[in-house]
Each structure stands twice: as structure tokens, then as C-alpha cells.
Amino acid sequence: MKMTFRWYGLNDCISLQTIRQIPGMTGVVTAVYDTPVGSVWSEDSIAALKKACDENGLEMEVIESVPVHEDIKLGRCRRDEYIENYCENIRRLSKAGVKCICYNFMPVFDWLRTNLHTLAEDGSNSLSYNHEEIMKLDPKHLSLPGWDESYTAEELNGLLESYAGMTHDQLFDNLVYFLKRIIPVCNDVKMNMAIHPDDPPWDVFGLPRIISTAEDYERLFAAVPDNANGITFCTGSLGAGRDNDLLQMAYDYAKRGKIHFAHIRNIQYSNELDFREVGHKTDCGSLDIYGIVKALVEGGFDGYVRPDHGRNIWGENAKPGYGLYDRALGACYLNGLFEAIEKGRK
Ligand SMILES: [Mn+2]
């Protein structure tokens, strides 16, 4: 296992000098942020990130994310051009020493929350999700907290219309089309692809979502069985699905060598669908983080881990979910769990 920390590049207010001081940190998870989705990343931009990491004794072996252009998800005619660009990014990143790429295949929206600053009793605040509030929203006139307003209202409406009537099977076929073209490149250059699950793991605004359950994973692995076609096991995303058996999934997919990357965080259920993000420790929330780490270790997991979202604590007012303090605490807790469980088995 290698413990890593998400870093938003040279403009991140959390510096690499700071990250390297967290005990047990081996590297960062980052991306090139200066290029439009679907384009090829410049070798200079990749090299600048790599150089900064090298200078701080941190590895840059995981990229999160190389985003997938909507035309690929929609199966539009320009998809081949965007897939070729994606393949070129895989080659360039591999040349820079990257071993794993995290991506997702969620139409239009990725993560969805209704409040980014839900206050807890201890005075900390964190992200939360309220399904009723989501249902009340009109996706065509959306104002969601944290939603990246990279689309104008018109573009968003156009995009939503393009997805009208798209079924789960059609979206899945478009994912397989994409994977069948990129995985041979991954095999050539020894890159692992790690698809992030849907967050939350159910359809939103009538848009299909296809990486939410154990059944979805079986379909994914069967369609493209190569080892390079793996997953990002995100406990907070999958854990919002009350029927997902995270311990079983963690053990099973680790055993099959499918988990290239793990995002670990805890959430507290407030009813059947709603939740808020909490501290990483098991008894802070509804997920058995100890049990999940134990299942990963027993399954032989040897991929990358990062503490996923943290709360705002100690007066920090960070990018939602991505402050320093709570994620650093999470990393230390997770390192402790891994060490104890791994040594306990010897
Ligand atoms: Mn995640």
C-alpha cells in the first residue's frame, strides 16, 4: 500500500512542503488543470508537476483525473478523436512515471452534495447530501454548491437534452467502446485505469449511472477482463448505497487484483438516502473503516490509498472536502490501521 494525498497542482494553497511532512506520505495524486477536457496535455505541464514532486521527495504515480469528454460518454461521432487524445495522455503520463489513472464515467455531473458546510456539534463542518432537496431542483436552472460552473445555462441544457432517453445499457456500451480502445495502450505502457464509482451511487436528474453496485462491477470486469481495467474503491461513494456490502466488495475485488486505488472516508447516514461526511475513524460514522481496511489487506491489496474528503476543522476554510488538517489526520489513522492489520497477520 502506498499512502498519497490529493494535490491540486502548483496553485493549491496546500504546498508540497506541507504534504511531505505528513507521516508516511509517499506521493501525491494530481492532474494538469490548464487544458480543456478532451485535449492532449502538454509535456511541459506534466513535467512541471513531476519536477515539483521530485524536488519535494514525493512520487507522482497517480493522476486524478484524466477527465472523459462528454462526446465519449454520449457515443457521438467525434469520440474517436477524443479517445485518441486520451491514449496520447496515457502514453505521456506513463513516460513521466505515472502508474495509475483515476477517471469516472458519470454523465454531466460528478459528485453531488446539497450543502458544503453542514455544521456538526463539535463546531466542524463538512459536505452533506439531502435527496429531497435534490429532487426539488430543476437541473436546467441549476445552482448547486460546488458545482463547477464551466457550462453556461444554455450549454448545460443542450448537454442534458443530448442525454435524454439514454439508457444504462447505452451508456455502458459507450464505456466499453472507450475501454476497448484505451486498454491496449495501457497494456503497452503498463498503466492501470481506475474508474471512480458514482457519487452518490444512484441516478440523478434522470441521467443514468452505471458504476454503483456489485452487479455493475461484474459487468464491467466481464466486458473488459484485462488487469489494467480496474477501479478506484471509494468507500464514501459506494457506502452511500445502503445495499453495498463494502467489506465483501473490498475483499473480493482486492483478491482479484481489481483495486488499483482506494479513496477512504466515512459518512454518517441521517436516514435512508441522506448522509453527511464525518471524520475518518470508524466510530465517527456509519461505515466500518477498520473492517474495510482489514478486508483490503486480507484480499492482498497493494495499490494506492488516499484519505478522501476531510471536514473543515481548527478554523480552516478550505476547498470543500480538501483541507489539510482533517485529511492529514485521516492519513495517519489509515496508516495506523494498515500497519496494525498488516503486522497482526505476520
Ligand atoms: Mn472518491
Image (tube, rainbow, N blue to C red):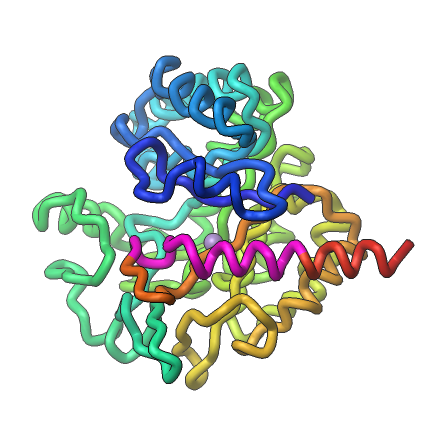
Q: Measured from the top left, where is residue 301 in percent x and y?
A: 73, 48
- Image-quadrant location for residue 272: bottom left
Residue furthest to the right: 346
Whether residue 220 is visible, yes or no, is no
Q: Is residue 210 left or right of residue 315?
A: right
When the figure is inspected, residue 70 is found, relative to residue 313, above or below; the finding is above
Coordinates of residue 170 in the picture (x, y in percent): 42, 47
Q: Position of residue 124 (x, y in %)?
A: 36, 73
- Rendered position, 197 above or below 144: above
Report which quarter residue 89 is drawn in.
top left
Can you say which quadrant of the picture contains the N terminus? top right
Stretch of the chain drawn in magenta: 318-335
- Whether 332 is among the magenta residues is yes
- 57 shown above or below 333: above
Depth check, front residue: 178 or 288: 288
Report the predominant secondary structure element of the magenta stretch: helix
Residue 291 vs 270, above or below: the answer is: above
Q: Position of residue 313 (x, y in %)?
A: 37, 66
Name the residue at 37% across, 36% down. Answer: 67
- Count the numbered circles shown: 0
Judged left or right of residue 245, residue 285 is left
Identify which residue is drawn at 64% across, 53% down.
218
Residue at horizontal 58 percent and vertical 43 percent from the top: 25
Q: Does residue 317 appear to the left or right of 52 in the view shown? A: left
Q: Residue at x 32, y 34 (%)?
A: 69
> Residue 292 lies in what quarter of the image?
bottom right
Is residue 322 visible in the rendered image? The answer is yes
Q: Is residue 226 magenta?
A: no
Image side of residue 255 versus residue 74, left or right: right
Indicate the quadrant containing the C terminus: top left, top right, bottom left or bottom right.
bottom right
